[in-house]
């Protein structure tokens, strides 16, 4: 009975993640589209910037968490929750938006011949299963896709689409 319960829990978690990858682009279509564009155009730069941000924010959050667990009083640990979440929440938001953009990018690249809902669902399922694969999925695909998405999310705030040559000359006249 325990195995059946674990299977249904795993299935529920996968369905929730797939739903999450549908809801984020529906609520924030421009931000996810711009993040997807950056991830498609600059994958190596996005990954490196995502890796640096993950190490910085994650390292500080882990350090604060370790200090929280080592303090003897509950009051001091409670005060450290605020900076802990200040460093952890931007990281989680960036990775969430980034992974949503990576799923959208996968759905376009895999080009399933079905409607967009099922295409994104299949891409999200493939990413979940790929990241769940022991060793290679855990230590290669998950950090790469997370770093790519986080970096593309960060760059998307500063990236401006270059204008075609014809539009620049029209504006100067």
Image (spheres, rainbow, N blue to C red):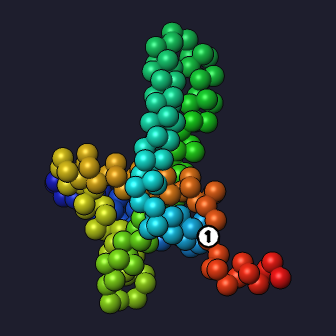
* 87 w.r.t. 99: above or below: above
The crowding category of the residue bearing disc 1, from other C-alpha atoms within 10 Å (few below 14, some 14 to 19, many at least 20), is few
When asked about the image quadrant of residue 15, the answer is bottom left
Res 118 → quadrant: bottom left
Res 22 visible: yes
Counting from the top left corner in percent of width and height, residue 25 is at 54, 70
Q: Give left or right: position of 26 versus 143.
A: right
Q: Is residue 109 above or below residue 102?
A: below
Viewer-nearest residue: 157 or 26: 157
Seen from this angle, which residue lies furthest right? 173
5 up-or-down from 48: above or below:
below
Question: Which residue lies under the disc numbered 1?
Answer: 161
Nearest the eye: 129 or 111: 111
Q: What percent of the width, then of the height, locates residue 41?
A: 46, 67
The residue lying furthest to the top in this view is: 72
Secondary element at image label 1: loop
- Going 51% across and 28% down the picture, which residue do you hit? 60
Q: Quadrant of the C terminus?
A: bottom right
Q: Position of residue 155 (x, y in %)?
A: 56, 55
Q: How many marks?
A: 1
Residue 146's x, y, as percent?
Answer: 40, 52
Residue at image coords 28%, 54%: 141
The quadrant the N terminus occupies is: bottom left
Asked if residue 38 lies left or right of residue 147, the reply is right
């Amino acid at each position: 009975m325990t195995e059946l319960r674990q299977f249904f829990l795993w299935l529920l978690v996968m369905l929730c993640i797939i739903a999450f990858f549908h809801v984020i682009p529906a609520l924030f279509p421009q931000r996810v589209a711009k993040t997807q564009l950056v991830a498609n155009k600059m994958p190596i730069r996005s990954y490196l910037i995502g890796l640096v941000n993950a190490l910085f924010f994650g390292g500080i959050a882990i350090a604060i968490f370790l200090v929280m667990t080592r303090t003897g009083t509950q009051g001091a640990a409670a005060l450290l929750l605020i900076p802990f979440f200040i460093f952890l929440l931007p990281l989680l938001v960036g990775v969430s938006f980034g992974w949503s953009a990576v799923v959208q990018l996968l759905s376009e690249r895999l080009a399933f011949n079905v409607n967009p809902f099922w295409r994104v669902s299949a891409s999200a399922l493939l990413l979940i299963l790929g990241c769940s694969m022991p060793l290679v999925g855990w230590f290669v695909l998950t950090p790469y896709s997370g770093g790519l998405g986080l970096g593309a999310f960060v760059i998307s705030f500063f990236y401006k689409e270059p204008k075609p040559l014809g539009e620049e000359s029209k504006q100067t006249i």
